Amino acid sequence: MLASRPLEDLARCPPGGRLTQADLLRCLAEVAAAPVGTVGWQFRTYQQPNTPLIVFGAGPAVTNVTANAFAAFVLLRHTQYRDLGVELDDLTVGVVVTPSKVRPWDTSMVATSGGWRPDAETLGSWTALWGVPGRPTKAA
């Protein structure tokens, strides 16, 4: 289930889980440096007990494909952290920034809550693509 109160959800995030401008600029620079013909992503996950899980990403562009990919990543991390038994608030908030032609970047957000989980086949596909928390993954 995707949450529908983005600003309220984001406001619930603890100050320590909010991204610094230096983090943002570093992530955007790394995405921009992705080799031609590839799609670069950078992710940071902020987790503190009994607070929303925060997933921050920097991606290549705003398209339906990248929007759906980021939503899948947030839903996957929400499921994985719940499965790990990490003491989290029931909410996971994801924010992705992408380069923009009109301003320095565009910002999109997705949030989810509850015990929703993908079916086993989808979970396996997403895990193969995005990996597990704490282990870097090079997606093809």
Image (tube, helix red, strand yellow):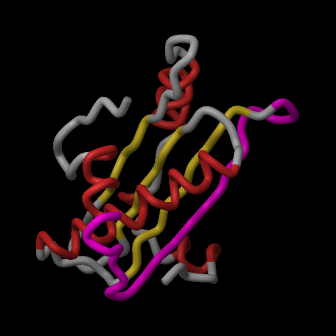
Q: Residue at x 41, y 71 (%)?
A: 92
Give the extent of the magenta segment.
Answer: 101-122
Q: Is residue 116 above or below residue 77?
A: below
Compared across the picture, whether 119 is left or right of 13 comes to: left
Let me know if residue 114 is in the magenta part.
Answer: yes
Image quarter for residue 95?
bottom right
Q: What residue is shown at x 32% (from left), y 56% (from top)?
A: 46
Q: Residue at x 17, y 78 (%)?
A: 87
Number of marks in the image? 0
- Give the image location of residue 80, x and y in percent: 23, 66
Q: Position of residue 119 (x, y in %)?
A: 32, 75
Residue at the far bottom: name it: 114
Write the residue at 50% across / 17% down.
Answer: 34
* Image quarter of the C terminus: top left
Residue lying furthest front in this view? 121
Along the line of sight, which residue is nearer the eye, 47 or 126?
A: 126
Looking at the rendering, which quadrant does residue 42 occupy? Answer: top left
Query: 34 or 65: which is nearer to us?
Result: 65
The location of residue 72, given as percent across then percent down, is 45, 60
Q: Is residue 91 left or right of residue 10?
A: left
Q: Residue furthest left?
A: 85
Report x, y in % for residue 40.
49, 28
Magenta span includes 10: no
Q: Please state if 54 lies on the left or on the right of 107 as rendered.
A: left
